[in-house]
Amino acid sequence: MVTTSLSLPEIARETRQASRQLAILTNEERNEALEAIAEALTANADKILAANIADVQTAKAMELSPALCARLELSPGKLKTAIAGVRDLAKLADPLATIQINRQLDQGLILRRITCPLGVLGVIFEARPDALIQITSLAIKSGNGVILKGGKEALRSCQALVTIIHQALSQTKVNSAAVQLLTTREEIQELLKLDQYIDLIIPRGSNEFVRYIQNNTRIPVLGHADGICHLYIDKEADLSKAIRITVDGKTQYPAACNTIETLLVHQDIARQFLPAVAQALEEKRLNYWEMKQLVRLLTYHRPQKKTGKPNIVI
């Protein structure tokens, strides 16, 4: 955890108290906190990037996978985009105190569903420093405290970010204890036992990891499946636009967890679309692995080899 003399249960208790204060703040006060975070991240960009460079250098020295290193790297452009995302979030409508259901069940008996904060979130995520910025901002906007645990490869980056976020929040009505960072794997085990303080665990990672979290805590878990991303091109689609979306969805950020893995095409446009998209993928130096029955449709075709380049299944 960030340097402190407190135990994890004591930190979680502080976060819970801070989350209760956060929950009753106005939307304007929460937005002011987001703007303060955006300003602090901008002012301290050099410190953040220096910490991230050290993380990336360590990862490369350990010969970690190129995909992990790509997710880990926080370039000036990625940091700028993340900061813009914080400000965009502040512009959105208040997600709290919204009446979603207002139904009279009987005379004098009215059922209402009104949005409110959950309390304290425990979010375990991969070695992606920009994810920390996104998660923290979403937690504050929605009135929730958050205890963060990023991938160990991003330790310096995460510590720098949380330190700066704490400094920013100290100038606002949001208690900085509403945002906490864990730094060791052992703390995850302890976190999973703190059902009296944590209201929801959100694990990001492999299916196996998510299942492990679900099987080792009494805290509700917002899990996910494998999440292999598919893109479907319908027969009514604008084919030129579909090609651009296919290429962008695979090449814009290949290391991202939501990059396209499988391309599905309506059979009525296969003969026209597949050769064109295959050529576009080849121009971006991507491998594609087509089903055998489609080979005859690919007038533009080359034998594929496993080269370690990004792949897409057609």
Image: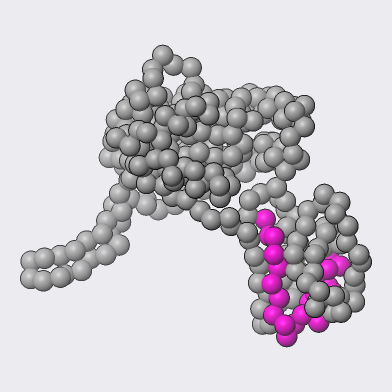
Q: How is the image coloured?
A: one colour
Question: Which residue is at the far left?
Answer: 107
Q: Confirm whether residue 28 shows in the render.
A: no
Quarter-of-image position of residue 158: top right
Residue 86 falls left or right of residue 81? left
Residue at image point 73% right, 57% down: 250
Residue situated in front as seen by the camera: 38 or 276: 276
Q: Position of residue 165 (x, y in %)?
A: 49, 29
- Does the segment drawn in magenta span residue 141? no
Residue at image point 47% right, 32% down: 188
Q: Confirm whether residue 289 shows in the render.
A: yes
The answer to whether 245 is drawn above or below residue 298 in the figure is above
Instruction: Considering the whole magenta stretch, tell me its main secondary structure.
Output: helix
The answer to whether 169 is drawn above or below residue 255 in the figure is above
- Does the segment drawn in magenta span residue 270? yes
Q: Quadrant of the C terminus?
A: bottom right
Q: Position of residue 271 (x, y in %)?
A: 81, 82
Residue situated in front as seen by the camera: 232 or 130: 232
Number of numbered discs: 0
Magenta range is 259-280
Residue at image point 27% right, 56% down: 114
The answer to whether 48 is drawn above or below residue 227 in the figure is above
